[in-house]
Image (spheres, helix red, strand yellow):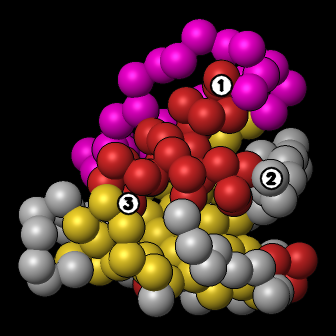
């Protein structure tokens, strides 16, 4: 588990950007307010900067369930499944039916019953001491197996 300050989130997202591919899946877990959407905003804005595309607002899709971003030829699907109660609803969303390659960032993925082979699970925690400090745990599967963020 790695401790970091919210101001260091860009460092974490840049490390992930070095490995991310256009069909990867990121599962983000953690209590409300631990930094899932803040991380997603950083990751998307860093990809926009890398591709020389104007930064956009990245909002939490809690009520919309999905926000989609296009960065040149790259498509990012940002889901928030917090309000989804049944796995059938997830299936109806067609998250994994998209034949077009896209990066899927999914907050609150616990309800997903499908075993997604190539995924990076990122868990966010309050550090307990300072308001602007968090802890992060990263676990990779498939192509992400062995991926680590050891330091900032």
Q: Residue at x 38, y 60 (%)?
A: 36
* Quadrant, the C terminus: bottom right
Secondary structure category for the residue under label 3: helix
Q: Is residue 101 visible?
A: yes
Q: Residue at x 34, y 36 (%)?
A: 59
Q: Position of residue 63 (x, y in %)?
A: 26, 46
Task: List the residue tagged with mark 3.
Answer: 36
Q: Is residue 115 above or below residue 103?
A: below
Distance of mark 3 from mark 2, alpha carbons?
Answer: 19 Å
Q: Which numbered disc, 3 or 2, marks the residue closer to the eye?
A: 2
Q: Which numbered disc, 2 or 1, marks the residue closer to the eye?
A: 2
Density class for disc 2 (Cα within 10 Å; few <14, some 14-19, many ≥20) is few
Question: Which of marks 2 and 3 precedes in the sequence?
Answer: 2
Q: Is residue 65 magenta?
A: yes
Question: Which of marks 1 and 2 precedes in the sequence?
Answer: 2
Seen from the viewer's position, the closer of residues 121 and 99 is 121
Secondary structure category for the residue under label 1: helix
Task: List the residue tagged with mark 2.
Answer: 18
Q: Position of residue 147 (x, y in %)?
A: 76, 79
Q: Is residue 20 above or below residue 86?
A: above
Describe residue 48's horizontal placement relative to residue 137 as left or right: right
Q: Which residues are magenta?
A: 50-74
Q: Quadrant of residue 24?
A: bottom right
Q: Is residue 39 above or below residue 68?
A: below
Q: Position of residue 33 (x, y in %)?
A: 19, 62
Q: Is residue 119 above or below residue 97?
A: below
């Amino acid at each position: 588990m790695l401790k970091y300050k919210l101001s260091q989130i860009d460092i974490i997202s840049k490390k992930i950007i070095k490995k991310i591919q256009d069909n990867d899946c990121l599962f983000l877990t953690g209590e409300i307010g631990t930094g899932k959407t803040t991380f997603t905003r950083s990751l998307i804005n860093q990809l926009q900067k890398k591709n020389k595309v104007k930064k956009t607002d990245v909002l939490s899709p809690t009520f919309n369930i999905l926000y989609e971003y296009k960065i040149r030829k790259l498509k990012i699907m940002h889901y928030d499944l917090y309000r989804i109660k049944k796995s059938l609803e997830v299936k109806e969303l067609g998250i994994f039916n998209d034949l077009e390659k896209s990066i899927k960032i999914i907050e609150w993925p616990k309800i997903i019953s499908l075993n997604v082979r190539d995924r990076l699970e990122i868990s966010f925690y309050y550090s307990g001491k300072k308001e602007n400090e968090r802890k992060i745990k990263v676990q990779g599967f498939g192509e992400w197996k062995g991926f680590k963020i050891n330091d900032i």
